[in-house]
Amino acid sequence: MTIEGDSKQYDLLSAWAERTAKEFSKNKETIMLTAEIGVRKGLGSKLIMNYIRPNYSGLHFHIGIDPYGDMIYPHYDNTKPIKMDYGEKMYAEFQKDFAGEPRFNLLKMPDDVFFEKYYYGVEFYYDAKQYVLNRYGLVHFDGPHKTSDVLTETIFFARRAAPGAVFIYDDWQKYNMAICRDAAKEFGFEFITNGDRKTILQKTK
Ligand SMILES: C[S@@+](CC[C@H](N)C(=O)[O-])C[C@H]1O[C@@H](n2cnc3c(N)ncnc32)[C@H](O)[C@@H]1O
């Protein structure tokens, strides 16, 4: 199965997923939660799971947040609302490609609805146990590309970030990344690296 992505620098996402998994394996915690905002066909989520699971000594859970649904909204600061191809056909393809993937919940809703519904954590039912998880080890920000949206996402996940957590932002040159970086800094994050598509922050304090 080949899953197409729509961006670049997936190697950076894979490398940091692997690295974070190895770092988190040194902790006493035995559960790691990761998230991707904006899933589309699923390449980002696939890489996160593929590079974390073989490298993490504990149990890894992943969520994807995406409404699909042919929603009409402005994709960038100061642009008009438009419809892209993120519709039900794409969602059906995604479901087929990820059928049976364990410990992966696709939450089919936009980020702002997710923030309200899952303020106190996300639930998983796995191997005869209930898990309610609210501490994130890695987040891939690749949903809306408006500064106000990415800033709100940054603050929501920074409040719930585990020590050593990594935030990876796609298309960071399309919005005001400096504001998001400054906000994350208030929660102990520092700038690690960037390329022309992705930038990486890590919670070091
Ligand atoms: C650039 S694509 C994601 C690409 C994907 N991460 C990859 O690596 O292949 C953007 C996705 O964000 C989703 N999206 C748009 N607005 C959103 C929102 N408010 N919350 C969550 N997802 C959103 C769209 O439905 C679309 O699937």
Image (cartoon, rainbow, N blue to C red):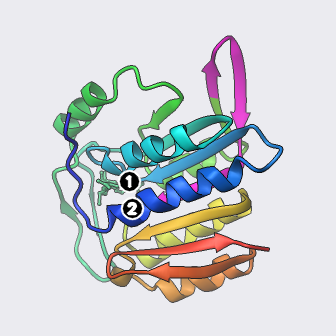
Q: Main secondary structure of the magenta part?
A: strand
Q: Find residue 158 and report its horizontal and vertical position in percent.
A: 67, 65
Q: Quadrant of the C terminus?
A: bottom right
Give the quadrant of ligand 1: bottom left
Span colored in magenta: 124-143
Q: Is residue 73 visible?
A: yes
Q: Find residue 130 and report its horizontal and vertical position in percent.
A: 71, 21
Measured in 3D between alpha carbons, the distance from the residue under mark 1 to the one under mark 2, in whole angstroms, is 5 Å
**Residue, far right:** 28
Q: Quadrant of the N terminus?
A: top left
Where is mark 1, residue-wise? Answer: 38
Where is mark 2, residue-wise? Answer: 142
Amino acid type shown at disc 2 = Asp
Q: Is residue 18 above or below residue 182?
A: above
15 relative to 4 in the view: left or right: right
Disc 1 Cβ-to-ligand 1 distance below 8 Å: yes
Describe the element under mark 2 as helix, strand or loop.
loop
Q: Using the image as rendered, state which of residue 157 and residue 201 is in the foreground.
A: 201
| First-in-chain label (1 vs 2) | 1
Determine crowd level at label 2: few under 14, some 14-19, many 20+ residues with C-alpha closer than 10 A: many
- Please say whether residue 100 is one of the residues in the magenta stretch: no
Disc 2 Cβ-to-ligand 1 distance below 8 Å: yes
Q: Find residue 123 and report its horizontal and vertical position in percent.
A: 64, 30
- Please say whether residue 131 is one of the residues in the magenta stretch: yes
Q: Residue at x 22, y 43 (%)?
A: 3
Q: Residue at x 24, y 67 (%)?
A: 81
| Residue 17: mark in rendering | none
Residue 154, quarter of picture: bottom right
